[in-house]
Image (cartoon, grey):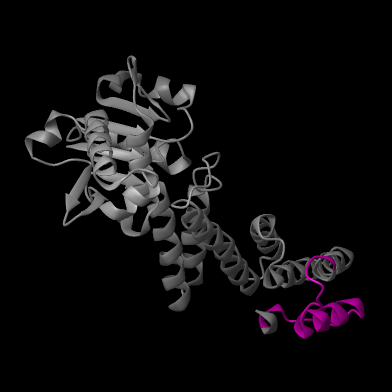
Amino acid sequence: MNILVIGGNGLFGRKTVLHLLQDKEVSLVVSMDVAPPRDWLLKEIDSYKDRFRFVRGDETIDAKVIKAYQKPLEILKVIAVSTNREVSREEILDYLWETSEGDRAMAAFQKALGRLRVLLDCPGLKENKESYVIAQGGRYALHPHCTWVDIEEFLKYVNLGKRYREDGLDDNAISAFQKADELWQGHLLEGHAPKPWLIPQRKRMEETYTNLHIEAAKLLLRKKDYALAEACVLKSLAMNPDSEEGVRIIALAQYAQGKKSEALKSLNDFTGRMEKKFKTESSPKTQKLKTLIRIDKQINPLEWI
């Protein structure tokens, strides 16, 4: 079996690559990421180098450097970041060959797809008439059993955390959210030009990231782990400082730790930013919280989340 790992240089990706290389049933691991492999990782897998290839940007790195073309990798990126890792031929043509005419665009697509399969596939898969990129009914997807994508794992743990939370399993939910956080490597395809096919997916992932930390912080407030709740929601606010719910949560966590001045500063900074940026006031709920903190009222965080 041959496995393609997309996002193979992230924390979980590296662990996955090493685990797969140690599996005797896996004959080849192809890792793809926008960042180069760490030196220590290359040393770690040195004994498996005949079964390992790494694809980055416009080149493939293994025992030697093999030149690859950019369009094939663009196809792979489009499929990998699309919902359910599946996209139609028409969408790929619109995204990557929007300035080309129909027949010319189709010919270019078929050529690029062929190059992608040559780049990533190997005889083991081809003998089974399978590829890392499979086609069915005009749609293209990553092989469900022979590919691993970090963003898919990220979303899996986020959704798992939500289910645990709904079932009242707070500790399990927090653990799942923490695993999702460990998979986060920053903005989706950071450094990549914000093309039409990437913008909505990048926005979706960023919203998911900020929301998971708010949900995790709520659970930590419920457990009275106020310091960890503060650290957790800070990650959300670093990406979306205009989240009013996030600001209330961090103020609650700070106040519960006896940090009244910091809690008021968090609320005042948010209020000032809303007035300057959006010409509007904070909600009555936020204003009430600020008043209660100012007059040193005892507050039960559970009544605010």
Rendered position, 169 above or below 125: below
From the viewer's side, name the closer residue of 302 and 27.
Answer: 27
Q: Looking at the rendering, in which quadrant would you find the C terminus? A: bottom right
Asked if the stretch drawn in magenta spans residue 234, the answer is no
Q: Quadrant of residue 29?
A: top left
Q: Quadrant of residue 86?
A: bottom left
Judged from this view, the residue extending furthest toward the front is 101
Q: Quadrant of residue 282?
A: bottom right
Q: Position of residue 33 (x, y in %)?
A: 42, 36
Q: Position of residue 104 (x, y in %)?
A: 27, 40
Q: Viewed as shown, does residue 127 lie left or right of 105?
A: left
Q: Viewed as shown, does residue 208 lie left or right of 289?
A: left
Q: Position of residue 219 (x, y in %)?
A: 58, 71
Q: Is residue 21 visible?
A: no
From the viewer's side, name the closer residue of 240 and 146.
Answer: 240
From the viewer's side, name the closer residue of 183 and 149.
Answer: 149
Residue at coordinates 36% horizontally, 44% vertically from top-left?
Answer: 97
Q: Is residue 195 visible?
A: yes
| Magenta region, residue range | 276-302
Q: Position of residue 46 (x, y in %)?
A: 35, 19
Rendered position, 61 above or below 229: above
Rendered position, 5 above or below 260: above
Asked if the stretch drawn in magenta spans residue 291, the answer is yes
Residue at coordinates 26% horizontally, 29% vertically from top-left?
Answer: 119
